[in-house]
Image: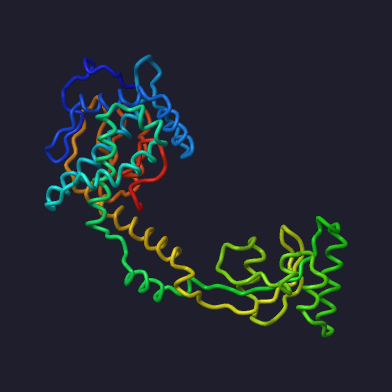
């Protein structure tokens, strides 16, 4: 555990990062801000639990902090210091406009307005600057895609944006009972094999009234619209050929794929932007990993040690606590020490 009193710190430095110092007083000030915000502590610990981490904010003794949590918080401090240094090296600046634009994201990242307002003003400003700083350097090293990039990605990855127009006839076991529903779908399949019109049966015999009103049509769209077994059939059946009975968690279906092919960009633009966002996140993550790999980081032994070699990405770039198991590396700049996620787009 780590005490919360500055008088317990054996030296002024918590950690040095490429020669710049994060003081023990700065770290203790952040810990004090967190200790004074009960709602935030609850948010943090819920986030830690959701990540499966055996870690708390408070230590075992009164007025102390869990050493793994302190190491995690200090790791974030190292990352933000590296981003500050990189921003200065590139001649960039975090402007008042940047701070204003990123304030809502900073508020959301800690759990909302009430939680944010419970922090001292100085710590609120620090959280907003961290968010703006992350966005500023990310926009520099991994810019948001423009219209041309969106179209180029779509054209190069059309196989990922295939859509299907599909119709079905449905027999509902919840309505008819499992055995009767199965027998009914098999009888309808027999009628189709003998020449019955699919659309007439769908309109008159299907247990799906919404689709029956459209002669069995479920309209067109991409993956994710249907339950897994139905979706698998819809994306693998030959176009224009009625399936044999398909059983899903909902019931029994006869499926007709009307058409299948790449969806227009206008219909899948949100998916394309999301995919590019994940790619952007990966690019920024690699940039941060490189910064931490190359950094000269020296931690005050009271708080732990800097662990992870450049050739070990599972361990690189984290402060290990002085005792007990190594605290996992935090999600990255932009995230708080207990909540999942990381910087915008990461």
Q: Of 319 and 247, which appears nearest the observer?
A: 247
Q: Quadrant of the N terminus?
A: top left
Quarter-wise, where is residue 179 in the image?
bottom right
Residue 138 image position (x, y, % from top left): 26, 53
Residue 15 image position (x, y, % from top left): 19, 32
| Position of 61 relative to 87 (above/below) | above
Q: Residue at x 16, y 24 (%)?
A: 12
| Position of 243 relative to 2 (above/below) | below
Residue 316 image position (x, y, % from top left): 29, 45
Q: Residue furthest bottom?
A: 195
| Position of 2 relative to 161 (above/below) | above
| Position of 268 relative to 319 (above/below) | below
Left or right of 290, for residue 168: right
Q: Of 19 and 34, which appears nearest the observer?
A: 34
Residue 234 image position (x, y, % from top left): 64, 71
Quarter-wise, where is residue 44 in the image?
top left
Left or right of 206, for residue 160: left
Q: How many marks?
A: 0
* Colour scheme in use: rainbow
Q: Residue at x 44, y 35 (%)?
A: 48
Q: Residue at x 82, y 69 (%)?
A: 185
Q: Residue at x 44, y 73 (%)?
A: 265
């Amino acid at each position: 555990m780590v005490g919360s009193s500055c008088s317990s710190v054996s030296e002024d430095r918590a950690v040095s990062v490429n020669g710049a110092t994060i003081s023990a007083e700065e770290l203790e000030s952040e810990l004090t801000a967190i200790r004074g915000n009960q709602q935030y502590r609850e948010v943090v610990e819920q986030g830690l639990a959701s990540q499966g981490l055996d870690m708390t904010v408070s230590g075992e003794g009164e007025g102390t902090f869990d050493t793994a949590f302190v190491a995690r918080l200090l790791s974030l401090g190292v990352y933000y210091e590296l981003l500050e240094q990189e921003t200065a090296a590139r001649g960039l600046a975090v402007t008042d406009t940047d701070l204003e634009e990123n304030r809502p994201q900073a508020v959301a990242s800690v759990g909302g307005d009430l939680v944010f307002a419970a922090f001292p003003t100085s710590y609120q400003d620090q959280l907003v600057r961290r968010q703006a700083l992350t966005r500023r350097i990310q926009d520099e090293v991994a810019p948001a895609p423009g219209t041309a990039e969106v179209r180029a990605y779509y054209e190069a990855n059309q196989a990922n944006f295939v859509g299907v127009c599909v119709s079905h006839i449905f027999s509902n076991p919840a309505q008819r009972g499992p055995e009767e529903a199965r027998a009914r779908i098999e009888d309808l399949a027999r009628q189709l094999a003998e020449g019955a019109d699919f659309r007439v049966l769908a309109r008159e015999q299907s247990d799906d009234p919404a689709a029956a009103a459209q002669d069995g049509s479920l309209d067109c769209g991409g993956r994710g619209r249907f339950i897994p077994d139905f979706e698998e059939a819809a994306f693998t059946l030959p176009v224009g050929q009625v399936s044999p009975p398909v059983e899903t968690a909902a019931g029994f279906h006869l499926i007709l794929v009307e058409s299948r092919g790449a969806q227009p960009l206008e219909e899948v633009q949100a998916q394309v932007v999301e995919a590019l966002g994940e790619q952007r996140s990966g690019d920024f993550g690699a940039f941060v990993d490189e910064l931490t790999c190359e950094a000269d980081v020296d931690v005050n032994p009271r708080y732990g040690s800097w662990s992870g070699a450049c050739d070990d990405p599972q361990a690189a770039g984290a402060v290990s606590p002085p005792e007990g198991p190594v605290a996992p590396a935090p999600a990255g700049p932009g995230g708080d020490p207990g909540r999942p996620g990381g910087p915008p787009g990461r």
